[in-house]
Image (cartoon, coloured by chain):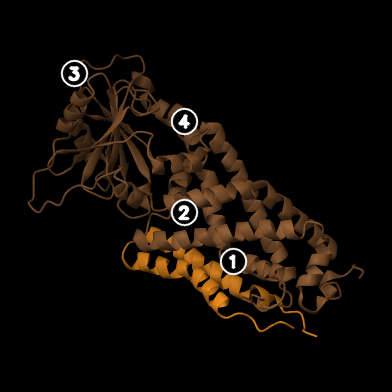
Chain colours: A orange, B brown
């Protein structure tokens, strides 16, 4: 019987990804060059997580 | 969370989603190509780029562009002269009357040579069609405001989706997609994962989209209040018999706001300039302030600055909202990332619709019990008050 997860386990990654997204949304507004590059990588993070999760299907069939 | 509050939020997520999903699918599907509208217009021949010039030329005389445009449409009026933000070009917007909302023609000129480059197609072409569909469902201002309401419902749906994400994930590690059980669980896991990783982007694009639906009412309000106050002293004066060339107005505005650049100029007779003036709209030089405008009112008879104002807060909000909705502020790579997030959102919308259809006879607590591993959703203290 699996124990319920803690709030940190459930919300940790979503909160981190939201913070990274926020950095990406704002940084390209603040400047050009390196600021643009930062926004490309930051806003690519959610898509990267999705691709990684689909490429590593769960073995949690419980 | 108690089982009753879970049921309430689940109900709220279901109904807000059902109300807006079909419109959001349309917005995401039309928005996907519109992210690349500049590139598409060039590719489809609906726009051109200024040619490469290596030699340095003297600054172009803007009045010559105006005369050229006027000679191409002798019965029309010049409404606006707009500087291209991305390339060396100026655009002249003409109307059948100075106050006409629609343009009768848009001419593009090279800003280094003054050469006529292109007459932009008006209200035709596939990009324009997609744009109209995205902005107002081909139904004008009522269509735009309706989409704004749908946007608000969508924001409510996203927020309630975040709330019900927690109970569904109580025993599942982040990012798990269960492939080996029912297809329904696979769709649920994808819906939850794709929805939660894009949630901040979706909220920002959704809220800025709602703000953008108010652009015409906000500009109209600004025109009636602050712009009206700037030009009120000249309201009953006739149009000057001879207008100073627009170059004089630009020079006057540039010396009045020396740390800014010209974005566009409204011509005498148009609603944003009044009968007696040019209104030169200046912009800042950083990526953020480049979006913001400062109107400088220049007398078309004397060439002197009459007044200038800062932007009210609601227009600052609108103008900062625009890039955050369009994704056009960080080059082509940002547009590609934007399109990927849009595509993920389409999957979230579609999987939500699919899940609702497949389990529409099922109660929320049955669904929760089926999806949480080991089927014991209702026995933990966080969902107290429930019976099996």
Residue count near mark 2 (Cα–Cα under 10 Å), binned few <14, some 14–19, many ≥20: many
Secondary structure beneath disc 3?
A: loop
**B91 or B246, which is in the foreground?**
B91
Q: Are marks 4 and 1 on the same chain?
A: yes
Give the class, few, some or many, for how many residues have Cα within 10 Å of label 3's Cα (few <14, many ≥20). few
Chain letter for mark 2:
B
**Are the two marked residues, 2 and 1, in contact with CB atoms closer than 8 angstroms?**
no
Q: Is residue A44 left or right of residue B111?
A: right
* Residue B219 image position (x, y, % from top left): 45, 34
Picture quadrant of residue B281: top left
Task: Name the disc covering residue B32, or none.
Answer: 2
Mark 3 or mark 1, which has the lower sequence index? Answer: 1
Q: Could you give the CA–CA distance between mark 4 and mark 1, rounded to whole angstroms?
A: 39 Å
Q: Is disc 1 on the same chain as disc 3?
A: yes
- Say yes or no: labels 2 and 1 on the same chain: yes
Residue highlighted by disc 4: B220
Query: Could you tell me how far apart the alpha carbons at marks 3 and 4 are, in whole angstroms?
Result: 29 Å
Up the image or down, B251 lies above or below A40; here it is above
Residue at image mark 1:
B194
Q: Tell me if residue B370 comes above or below residue B278 in the rendering.
A: below
Mark 3 to mark 2 CA distance (whole Å): 48 Å
Q: Which mark identifies residue B310?
A: none
Which structural element holds mark 4? helix
């Amino acid at each position: 019987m699996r124990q319920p997860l803690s709030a940190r386990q459930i919300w940790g990654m979503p909160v981190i990804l939201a913070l990274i997204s926020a950095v990406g949304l704002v940084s390209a507004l603040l400047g050009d060059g390196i600021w643009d590059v930062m926004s490309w990588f930051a806003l690519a993070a959610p898509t990267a997580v999705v691709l990684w999760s689909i490429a590593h299907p769960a073995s949690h069939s419980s | 969370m108690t089982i009753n509050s879970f049921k309430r939020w689940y109900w709220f997520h279901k109904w807000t989603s059902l109300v807006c999903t079909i419109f959001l699918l349309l917005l995401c599907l039309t928005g996907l190509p519109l992210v690349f509208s500049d590139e598409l217009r060039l590719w489809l021949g609906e726009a051109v780029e200024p040619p490469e010039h290596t030699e340095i030329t003297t600054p172009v005389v803007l009045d010559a562009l105006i005369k050229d445009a006027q000679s191409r449409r002798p019965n029309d009026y010049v409404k606006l002269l707009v500087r291209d933000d991305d390339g060396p070009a100026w655009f002249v917007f003409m109307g059948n009357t100075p106050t006409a909302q629609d343009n009768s023609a848009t001419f593009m000129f090279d800003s280094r040579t003054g050469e006529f480059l292109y007459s932009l197609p008006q209200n035709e072409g596939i990009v324009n069609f997609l744009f109209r569909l995205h902005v107002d469902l081909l139904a004008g201002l009522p269509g735009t405001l309706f989409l704004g309401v749908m946007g608000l419902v969508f924001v409510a749906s996203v927020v309630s989706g975040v709330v019900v994400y927690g109970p569904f994930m109580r025993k599942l590690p982040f990012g798990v997609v269960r492939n080996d059980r029912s297809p329904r669980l696979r769709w649920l896991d994808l819906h939850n994962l794709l929805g939660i990783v894009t949630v901040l982007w979706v909220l920002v694009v959704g809220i800025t989209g709602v703000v953008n639906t108010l652009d015409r009412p906000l500009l109209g309000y600004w025109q009636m209040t602050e712009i009206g106050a700037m030009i009120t002293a000249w309201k009953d004066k006739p149009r000057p018999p001879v207008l100073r060339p627009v170059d004089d107005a630009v020079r006057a505005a540039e010396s009045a706001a020396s740390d800014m650049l010209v974005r566009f100029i409204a011509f005498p007779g148009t609603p944003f300039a009044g009968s007696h003036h040019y209104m030169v709209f200046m912009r800042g030089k950083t990526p953020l302030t480049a979006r913001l405008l400062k109107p400088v009112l220049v007398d078309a008879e004397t060439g002197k600055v009459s007044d200038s104002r800062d932007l009210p807060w609601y227009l600052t909000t609108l103008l900062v909202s625009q890039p955050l909705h369009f994704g056009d502020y960080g080059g082509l790579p940002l547009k590609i990332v934007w399109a990927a997030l849009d595509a993920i959102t389409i999957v979230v919308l579609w999987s939500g619709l699919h899940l609702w259809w497949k389990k529409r006879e099922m109660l929320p607590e049955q669904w929760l019990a089926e999806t949480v591993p080991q089927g014991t959703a209702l026995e933990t203290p966080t969902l107290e008050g429930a019976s099996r």
